[in-house]
């Protein structure tokens, strides 16, 4: 297999100025891709703007002999998101892969979360992934090829405290990704998700007020952002042409394939159900298979390897 898995592919990476997105952009370029490095340059909560993170990544790629161009557009805006894809097409002649990585955090316990907190996170993660993907979809359909790599999170897949907005967005991305895979499969377009475990400036907002919190953060700090890039590049390559509709995870040197929602028990009543019948028969029968209310750290209880 060629070492340059993405030779001459044109790839858009959103949120590529720092952290996971930067690692993906650099490895994609090292594997022959031409990059649109998109980053608004906002703060952890999505506020503000700064061109320097995207510019620095572009300079690093170009200095190493690659080809990249910066975009400072906001993925939350329909027209700007379309402009990201148009920049790729105008500069490099085509678009082959969208890696939806842009994100923000506005953590708050649910009963204190504001509408602004909720909307800000949904708009960047979920609507932003839709906007950029939709912009590329027309091109993918016309050329009968393309792929999406979307970032989800165990906050949505499993659960975490104080992240109702983030969890809703990230689980929504799983549904969005599956729909894109189903609707565009006829055009040889693929869509997959990655749940990354990695230290980043967003994760850096996790409180460290207790010894337990400090220990948790110390473990996360072992998992550097560049650990996510190999799976993302592999999924973007033609060698993964038969991989679509899946949800993966990366934690340090571990790669996971997540299960997806399927029925595991059923109950039937020929005469139909009443509320009393449900409580008397269905709930006791199902109880042994109920999922416990857990956080991501409860499920991934061993140290990163």
Image (cartoon, helix red, strand yellow):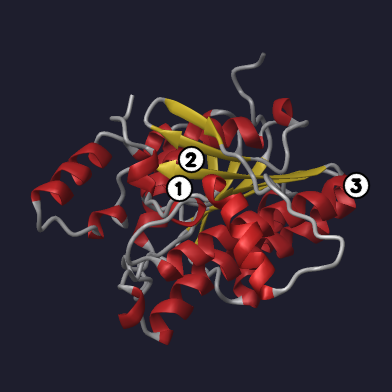
Label 2 to label 3, Cα distance in Å? 27 Å
Q: Nearer the viewer, residue 147 or 5?
A: 147
Name the spot of residue 242 as percent of width and height, x first: 77, 31
Report the side of 21 relative to 262 (left or right).
left
Q: Residue, x 68% and y 53% (percent of image)? A: 177
Q: Is residue 35 above or below residue 219?
A: below
Q: Quadrant of residue 190?
A: top right
Q: Residue, x 43% and y 27% (percent of image)? A: 254
Residue at the disc numbered 3: 186
Residue 24's label in the rendered image is 2
Mark 2 or 3: in front is: 3
Residue at the disc numbered 1: 21
Residue situated furthest bottom in the rendering: 115
Q: Are marks 1 and 2 in contact (CB under 8 Å)?
A: yes
2 or 3: tag closer to the N-terminus: 2
Report the side of 152 relative to 50 (left or right).
right
Name the spot of residue 280 as percent of width and height, x first: 61, 63
Q: Is residue 102 above or below residue 42?
A: above
Q: Quadrant of residue 166?
A: bottom left
Name the spot of residue 13 as percent of width and height, x first: 54, 50
**Residue 66 in view here:** no
């Amino acid at each position: 297999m060629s070492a340059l898995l993405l030779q001459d592919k044109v790839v858009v990476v959103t949120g590529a100025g720092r952290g996971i997105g930067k690692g993906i952009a650099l490895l994609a370029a090292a594997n022959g891709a031409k990059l649109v490095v998109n980053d608004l340059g906002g703060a952890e909560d999505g506020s503000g703007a700064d061109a320097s993170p995207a510019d620095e990544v572009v300079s690093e790629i170009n200095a190493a002999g690659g080809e990249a161009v910066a975009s400072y557009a906001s993925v939350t805006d329909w027209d700007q998101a379309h402009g990201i894809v148009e920049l790729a097409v105008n500069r490099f002649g085509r678009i082959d892969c969208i890696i939806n990585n842009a994100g923000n955090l506005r953590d708050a316990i649910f009963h204190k979360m504001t509408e602004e907190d909720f909307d800000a996170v949904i708009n960047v993660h979920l609507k932003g992934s839709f906007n950029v993907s939709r912009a590329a979809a027309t091109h993918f359909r016309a050329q009968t090829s393309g792929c999406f790599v979307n970032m989800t999170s165990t906050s949505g897949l499993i659960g975490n405290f104080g992240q109702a907005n983030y969890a809703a967005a990230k689980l929504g991305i799983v549904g969005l990704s599956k729909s894109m895979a189903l609707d565009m499969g006829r055009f040889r377009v693929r869509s997959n998700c990655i749940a990354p475990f990695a230290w980043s400036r967003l994760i850096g907002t996790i409180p460290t007020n207790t010894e337990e919190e400090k220990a948790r953060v110390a473990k996360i700090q072992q998992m550097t952002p560049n650990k996510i890039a190999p799976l993302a590049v592999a999924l973007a390559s033609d060698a993964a042409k038969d991989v679509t509709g899946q949800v993966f995870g990366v934690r340090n040197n571990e790669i996971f394939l997540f299960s997806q929602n399927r029925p595991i028990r059923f109950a039937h009543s020929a005469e139909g159900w009443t509320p009393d019948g449900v409580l008397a028969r269905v709930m006791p029968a199902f109880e042994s298979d109920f999922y416990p209310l857990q956080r991501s750290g409860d499920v991934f209880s061993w140290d990163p390897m």
